Amino acid sequence: MKKRVTALIGAGLLSTQIGATYATATAEEAKKLGTTLTMIGAEKAGNKDGTIPEYTGGLTTAPAGFDKSKNLRPDPFANEKPLFSINAKNMDKYADKMTEGTKALMKLHADYRIDVYPTHRTAGYPKSVLENTVKNATRAKLSDDGLSMIGARAGIPFPIPKNGNEVMLNYIGRYNGGTTVIPKFSAYNVGSGGNVMLSAQGIYMQESVYYDESRPEPTLMNRVRTSYTAPVRRAGEAAMTAEPIDNANESRRAYQYLPGQRRVRLAPDLNYDTPNASTSGMSTYDDVNLFNGKLDRFDWKLVGKKEMYVPYNAYRFLYNGKPEDVFQAKFINPDTVRWELHRVWVVEASVKEGKRHIYSKRTYYIDEDTWFILASDQYDGRGQLWRPGFSYMTQSYDVPTPTHFTSGHYDVIAGSYYVNQWPGSNGIKIGGKPMADSFWTPESLAGSGIR
């Protein structure tokens, strides 16, 4: 496998050594951005088989029927049919392009399948994000033994990465729109008996401070605020986090408002492997969006780049108006999930010596066009595959920005699964004006509880 994935990487891009502080790309290497590489760092050319097309700028035009006021985005590929399907009977033919989690689900459920559609490289970006990414190639540096970065600004930090830490920092610094609101997200848990339970519902808001160029020297990557409206036991709760850019020397600031206590309290536990209440404990807080938070509990090894079948352009899943048609017993309705072949960076995370985490190992599959984690395999303390995860990206062609807020994990030991931050027919509003700094204070959070 190592030989195969290495062959897919451009010369000089693979290394696992982390220095204290160094520039990531030479000026000569940076000239590839916009030529053989896209300005965001992906391979511009398609693959030799013709199954991955050349990148031509992404999808930046809305299809007919798009009404921005509804926050819903029609599927531009709704009329396409699957090229083929993969299930337990034919999975061996495609095994080298599937995650371990995908294969485990097929072995676990004879009726589980993935429908593979034509690949569309839809990721498109504002001009400023692309230009800043090119500048970051030679000005961004790793710091603090690879746990943080310095010098990057309002773009992908390391478009020509050389190690696993840089790839993960690209994910943490991904462009996901400026200010984003999910007016009514839902989280569903599906138990091993097939019972579908609403585990959380509320309003989600994120502001990408790092990409706000009106701020001369931002110190925050993003700010997130969630107000819960359901189920009844959680109605009125609210939480807020502020993620520092220098997350090696600073910690996430997290606050929580609990209506029973009628006060805002610091919530440092909303981090790492603390069970996430929004998924009724079926995931950890650093499972949100498949990973978030600090890098300090794992060693990050860049395995290479590989062609994989992953969920992509998931409009039918994300904006579906009927959750009962999506969340079915055992697994998500395969009819609603679109899979495509894409090139992904593969990063393996192993718990550092002297550190602890409920996952002993995690493997991440990171899209070359968006730097989104599209899939993950997570292993328990015995080394057994436990919680494979998937996220469901779309291109918000009207902004334009790739969009990545909804994800979930299967528990292949317990036979259950969950999906968090699913917008459904309430849609996603992207690109509004940033809220005033006063909105992001603990005092403001105290007044945000909604019953």
Image (spheres, grey):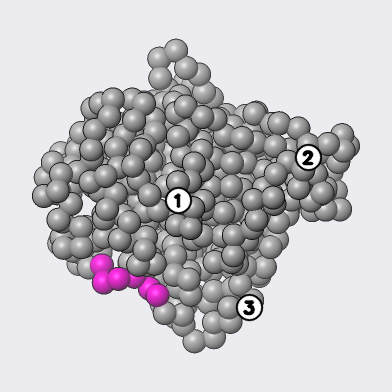
Q: Which residue is mark 1?
A: 216
Q: Is residue 383 above or below residue 124?
A: above
> Which residues lie in the magenta part?
55-60
Quarter of the image for residue 20 reads: top left
- What residue is shown at x 39% (from left), y 67% (from top)? 126
Q: Nearer the viewer, mark 1 or mark 2?
A: 1
Q: Nearer the viewer, residue 240 or 291?
A: 240
Type of amino acid under label 2 = Tyr
Q: Nearer the viewer, mark 1 or mark 3?
A: 1
Q: Which residue is mark 2?
A: 257
- What residue is shown at x 45% (from left), y 50% (from top)? 216
Question: N-terminal of the two: label 1 or label 2?
Answer: 1
* Distance between mark 3 and mark 2 Cα atoms: 31 Å
- What residue is shown at x 25% (from left), y 67% (from top)? 55
Q: Which residue is mark 3?
A: 69
Q: Is residue 219 above or below residue 359?
A: below
Q: Report helix, strand or loop for mark 3.
A: helix
Question: N-terminal of the two: label 3 or label 2?
Answer: 3
In the picture, measured across the screen, residue 418 lies left or right of residue 105, that is right
Magenta stretch: includes residue 272: no
Q: Outermost residue, front direction?
A: 216
Estimate the x, y position of residue 392 in percent, counting from the top left: 49, 57
Type of amino acid under label 3 = Ser
In the picture, measured across the screen, residue 343 lies left or right of residue 66, that is left
Name the image quarter holding the N terminus. Answer: top left
Type of amino acid under label 1 = Pro
Quarter of the image for residue 426 reads: bottom right
In the picture, measured across the screen, residue 217 lies left or right of residue 41, that is right
Question: N-terminal of the two: label 1 or label 3?
Answer: 3
Q: Nearer the viewer, residue 358 or 242?
A: 242
